[in-house]
Amino acid sequence: MYKVLLVDDERIILDGISTMVDWTSHRTELSGSAPNGLAAYERIQADPPDIVISDIRMPGLDGLELVAKTSASHPNIRFILLSGFSEFDYAKRAMQFGVKHYLLKPTNETKIAQALDEVTRELDIHSGTETFIRNMKQRFDKMVPHVKEQVLKEFVTNKTYGSQDWDYYRSLFQYDFDRPVRLLLFRLEGSAEFEHLFAIKNIAEDILETTRLGTTIGDHVLILIEDPGEPDALHERLGRIRSTFIQYYKMDVTIALSSPGDIVQARALYQETLQCLNYRFYLDEGGIITSKDTFQAADPAPDALDFDVDKLAMPVRSGHLREAEQALEELFASLKRAKLDIAMTKSYAIQLFISLIRLADPRRMNEGYQQIPQLVEMNTLQAMQDFLGRTARDIARRNYERNVVKHTTIVRKVLDIIEQQLGNANLSLNFVAGEMLYMNADYLGKLFKKETGEKFSNYVMKLRMKQATKLLAEEPDIKIFELAERLGFGDNPQYFSQVFKKQIGCTPSEYIKGVESTGF
């Protein structure tokens, strides 16, 4: 129901209109009446109606003045004006305030009803429009964080985005990018899950004071910040991000920090951070890397080719034929898109070939090196791809046959190490791979999951919880902090209790009570 306020200085007209109109049938209700414009405006302020039916000629504040004043304070209220024949031209002045409905005195129920129906339809349309716009705004507000993430991702990976696009999104998100910016690229050291990426992104955004945009790209987290202009303070915050993440997740993280630059250089700054991460093997895992730390502090190449030989070497080394073929296809598709000159393309192909033959049996490596001139003489990209494909398949098959027994032995060693080191707070995939078996952690993690069906971290956590329930049953008086310490949670019994409840379904204390009540 729409509320109606009736205004007229003649009491007989007020009473007549009040009783003659069937307000309900026109989806309205008479919320009150006023004898003049001043009293009417007080009512409008106290309890705004949707529609005002008002005479024009009134003492104090006439109808047109009431329209003007109400239009300024309550622009959504609709007016129906009553006027004498001689006042009609005068009433047209109200059109500047959007008044469309005038009734000549004396009026009747039919004319008022028709005017009410027209006004309520206008209000319906206005309400529907407002609801639609409000819903669109709510949807937009929900999408903005995701849009911002995608915008950053596109600007650092898509060559077609430029300064005009930045200007558009700057206006859309009401961002002021007048100051230089930096990019931070986070790489988790170990077998990272999305939970870990989400955590490091949120920890970084909480600690950094000038974060503008953030996103995930593959297994990396990328954050764009305004350059604070204080390198020491920035490095201190980055150190806090690392220590906080290590404290909660027992995983290290490497942070690549770009040079300061203009926002339109975002793609070049991103390439710089990728180049920094390439050097993390030389500078040890974990820590903060800038271009000054690399062997060559050169400017990043905006059009650098995304060409990672490890994408092919890893599946060939492990004997995964299908993955090797897919990786080779992707690498050559990248070469095709780059459209490099023949000499440069051949140099990439030779680089790939050398990385492959190094994975072969040492007795066959010399034979492989003798084939390099044959590769150099090839004149088409497809010929080079076919040649490398045959080489990759041959080495992958041989490695698979050799690794079948070897893999089972390695995983058995890992299981034994887990049993022996279950109480070691430093027990992790990186620890086992680097300190115990001297292997690549990523490769060992994939091998372990393939043969056990479990990720290393999940397997360790489940085994610890199994051991926890055993110890609680055997030693019901054991303190929770002692139990956490014995099972590798160090001095973090709270985290142990959280993991226990998630895995077992109750807290350690509740589990002890259950054991005591059942007598088992």
Image: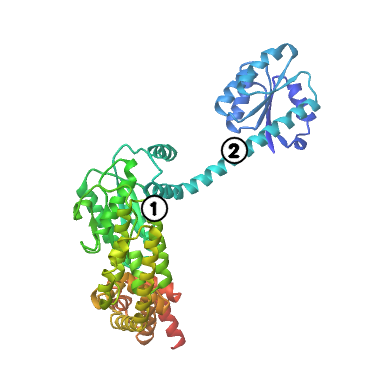
Name the residue rendered at 55%, 43% in the picture: 136
> Which mark identifies residue 215?
1
Q: Position of residue 327 (x, y in %)?
A: 39, 64
Name the residue rendered at 18%, 55% in the picture: 295
Judged from the image, the secondary structure of the residue bearing numbered disc 1 is strand
Identify residue for label 2.
Answer: 130
Left or right position of 421 against 504: left
Judged from the image, the secondary structure of the residue bearing numbered disc 2 is helix
Q: Position of residue 341 (x, y in %)?
A: 33, 51
**Relative to residue 151, is residue 39 depicted above or below?**
above
Disc 1: CA contacts within 10 A as few (<14), some (14-19) or many (>=20): many
Disc 2: CA contacts within 10 A as few (<14), some (14-19) or many (>=20): few
Residue nearest the viewer, comparing 490 with 1: 490
Locate the N terminus and report the quarter of the image it occupies: top right
Residue nearest the viewer, comparing 253 with 335: 335
Q: Are marks 1 and 2 in contact (CB under 8 Å)?
A: no
Q: Position of residue 258 (x, y in %)?
A: 27, 49
> Which mark identifies residue 83?
none
Amino acid under disc 2 = Glu
Residue 208 visible (yes or no) = no
Amino acid under disc 1 = Thr
Hey, which quadrant is residue 450 in on the image? bottom left
Locate the C terminus and report the quarter of the image it occupies: bottom left
**Relative to residue 151, is residue 380 depicted above or below?**
below
Left or right position of 431 against 168: left
> Which circle's residue, 1 or 2, is located before the other in the chain?
2
| Distance Cα–Cα, label 1 vs label 2 | 33 Å
Name the residue rendered at 75%, 22% in the picture: 13
Residue 148 visible (yes or no) = yes
Q: Position of residue 271 (x, y in %)?
A: 31, 51
Q: Please state which of the two labelled residues, at mark 1 or mark 2, is closer to the viewer.
A: 1
Residue nearest the viewer, comparing 371 with 251: 371
